[in-house]
Image (tube, rainbow, N blue to C red):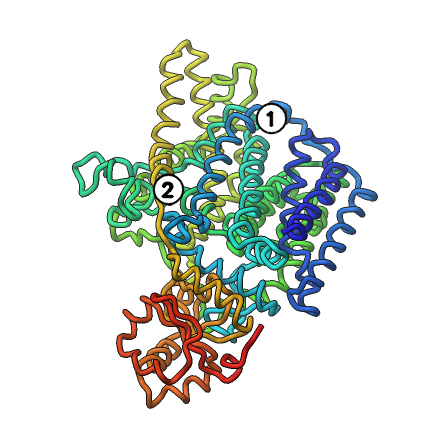
Amino acid sequence: MFFALIYFIAHLIAWGYAAQKLFATHPQWIRLGAGGVLGATALMWAPVPFAFFVQFSPLSHGLGLVLSCTLAGTIYAKARPLAASPINYGAMPKTLLWLGLPIFAVMAYLLHTHLILPTANGYDVGQSTFGDLQMHMGMVTSLARQQIFPPEYSILPGQRLSYPFLVNLVSSSLYQLGFSLRWALLLPSLLMCAMIVFSFILLAFEVSKDKRATQIATLLFFFNGGLGFIYFFGWHEYTFAQILTEFYKTPTNYNEMNIRWSNVIADMIIPQRTTMAGWSVALFALWALLRFTRTTVREEKRAWGMLAGVLVGLLPMIHTHSFMAIGLISLGWLGVDLVLRRKAIVQVIIDWCWYGLPAIGLGIGQLLFWTFQQATAGEGFVHFHLNWVNKLEIDPYFWFYLKNMGVVYVGWLIGLAVLARSAWRDKLAVAADGGEGSLLDKHLALLQLGPLVIYIVAELIIFQPNLYDNNKLFYIWYVFAAITAACVIITAFRYWLARGRYMLAANLVVFSIAIGCISGILTLAREWVSSYTAYNPAHVAAAQFIDQNTPTDAMFVTADNHNNTVAALTGRNIVVGTDTYLFFHGLDTKQRHDDVRKIYESPAERAALIAKYKVDYIFISDFERSSYPAFASLFGLYPVIFDNGQVQVLAVSQRAQNYQR
C-alpha cells in the first residue's frame, strides 16, 4: 500500500508544481485544480508507452513515473505562464466552498457506499453500481494480475479490450502496487469527482462571467432532472415513498413513462467510470479551448491551443464520447472563427493547427489501434436514427425533451431565440444590465454553434449498438445548455429587479431552481439509501482462495452472471461473460455461451471443449446450479480444490491440479 500511495501522490505533486508555473497568472484555486486535472491525466497515461514493451508491470510504472515527473519538471522550468482571462476569478472561491464542496461531499459519500463496501453481507454496492461496476472491476483486476498489454477482455479472452479502459488502468496500478481493490477504485474516483466539480465551475464562470449564473448552472447541472416527479403524485403507478424503495423507479429514470434523462451524479459519474474520468479531463479541456478561441494575442493563442489539443488528444481511450463531443464543438467554433475572420482565413487555419494537430496526432493512434477495430466489425456501430430514445413514437418531440430536461431545455430554447437576434440581445441588455454587464451577449451567442452541432449530430446518428449511449454526447451539450439557461434566468431576474418587481424576480429564481432540481434530488435520495449485496461472504472467500491459489492466467468456466466472482474479484479469465456488457460492445458470443452449457451438461462433448478453450478450473455456485441444472456429472471427474458449502472450484487441467504457489 505504501508504494501505491507514493506513486499516486508523486504524480499529483509533480503536476501540481507544473500547474503553479503554467497558470502562474491565475488565482491559486485554479492552479490547484489544474494540477489535479493534469495529475489525473498523467496517472492514466504514464505507464502506457512502456507497457507495450515490458507489459503492465511494476517496471512500466516506475518508468512511467519518471516520464511523468520529467515532463512536469520541464514545464515548470521552461514554460511561460498562460495569460489569465480579464474576468474576476476572485469571485469564485466562496462558491467552490459553499456549493462545490457539498456537491463533492455527496459524490464522496455515494462512492463510499457504492464501491464494494465490506459488510456482514459480503460486498455491498448501490443501485447505480450494481450493474456496470462489475465490468470495471474485472478490467481492474485482470490488468493488474495478468499484466497483459494491450489488455484483453477477461470475460472474452483473446479479444482485445477496445473499450476506453484508462480509468481502470489507474485503479489497476494502485491494486498491483498494494492497495485493496476497494481503495484502488475509491481513491482515483474521489480525485476525478473533485476535478469534475472544479472544472465545471471554472468553465461556467468563463462562459457566463457572472457568479450567480455560475451558481445556478452548477445546481441545474449536478442536480439535473426534468418533470419526471409529476408521475409520483399518486395518480400513476408509483408514489413518492416508492422512489426510495423500488429498483430504478426514480423521477430521472422511469422508462415506462419515457423518462430517460438520468441524473449526472447518480447515473453517470458514480457508476460509469469512463464518463467520470472523461469529464474530469474534458471539462477542463473545454475551458482551455474556450480560452484559445477568445484570446487575440497570437502567442497566447498558440499556448492555449496546444494545451487544449494535448488534453483532447489524450481523451479517446479515457472516454471516446467526450473526445467525439469536443471534436464536434471544435468544428462549430472553427466555423464561427472562419466566418468572423474570413479576411484572414490562412491565419485562422494556422491558429487552429496549434490545437488540431496535437488533438488529431495524439488521438488518431488510439482510434486506429483500439476504437475503429471494434466499431467497424460486422455491420459496424454507426447508423442513422432520429430523436434519440424517443423515436418519435411515444411522446411528441418537444414534450419528450421538455419533460426530461425541464427548466434547462426551456431556458436553452429561450436563450437561443434571444441570442439569435442582435436587436433583442441589445434591448434586453439595456433593460436588465443594472451596471453588471450583459450575460446574453455576442460571446454567448457565438459559443452556441459548437454545442448545437453536438445536439444535431446526436439527434441524427447513433454511434454504438445501444442507442441510449448517445446521452454521453448530449451531456456535453447539456453543460452549455445549463449555463445558457442560467444566464437567461439571471437576465430575467435583473430585468424584473430593475423594474421593482422584487417578488417576481425572487420567485423566478426559486421556482427555476426548485423545478430544475427536485427530480435530481429525489434520485440522489434513492441512491443515498440504496444497498444491494453484489458478492456474499461465500463468494468473497472463494475469490480470495482463487486469487492466492491459482495461476494469474488461469481459464475458468463459470455462468454468465454479470456479478461474476471469478472475473470481477480475481482477474482470472472466464470462457465468456454476460452479454449485458459484451453485446453492447459489438461482440458476438453465442457460440461460447453454447459451449459453456455443453461443458456443464454434456459429458460427451465436454472433453473436446475443455481442450478447445484450455480450461483450468470449473466454478460452481448458486448461479451455475440455476443456469445449468444437469451439472452433477462433473463431480467425481475432477478434484474439488475448494468447497465452502456454497461454492466449489474443480481443478480440470493437469497444471491446475499440480499448481502450488
Residue at (69, 30) in percent of width and height: 28
With 439 as the anchor, is 591 left or right in this view? left
Q: Position of residue 407 (x, y in %)?
A: 37, 33
With 152 as the anchor, is 220 left or right in this view? left
Badge 2 crowding class, 10 Å Cα cut-off, few under 14, some 14 to 19, many 20 or more, is many
Residue carrying label 2: 527
Q: Quadrant of the C terminus?
A: bottom right
Q: Position of residue 157 (x, y in %)?
A: 50, 74
Residue 428 shows up from this direction: yes
Given contact means CB atoms under 8 Å apart, are the residues at marks 1 and 2 in contact? no
- Mark 1 and mark 2: span between their CA atoms? 29 Å
Depth check, front residue: 522 or 360: 522
Which badge, 1 or 2, is on the more N-terminal residue? 1
With 111 as the anchor, is 12 left or right in this view? right
Residue carrying label 1: 93
Depth check, front residue: 185 or 225: 185
With 393 as the anchor, is 415 left or right in this view? right
In the image, residue 207 sits, relative to residue 575, either above or below, namely above
In the image, residue 214 sits, relative to residue 306, either above or below, namely above
Depth check, front residue: 107 or 315: 107
- Amino acid type at image mark 1: Pro
In the image, residue 313 sits, relative to residue 606, either above or below, namely above
- Amino acid type at image mark 2: Glu
Q: Secondary structure at mark 2?
A: helix
Q: Position of residue 493 (x, y in %)?
A: 43, 19
Query: Residue 160's quadrant in the figure?
Result: bottom right
Q: Secondary structure at mark 1?
A: helix
Query: Residue 227's quadrant in the figure?
Result: top left
Depth check, front residue: 349 or 598: 598
Badge 1 crowding class, 10 Å Cα cut-off, few under 14, some 14 to 19, many 20 or more, is some
Numbered circles on residues, count? 2
Q: Position of residue 246 (x, y in %)?
A: 27, 45
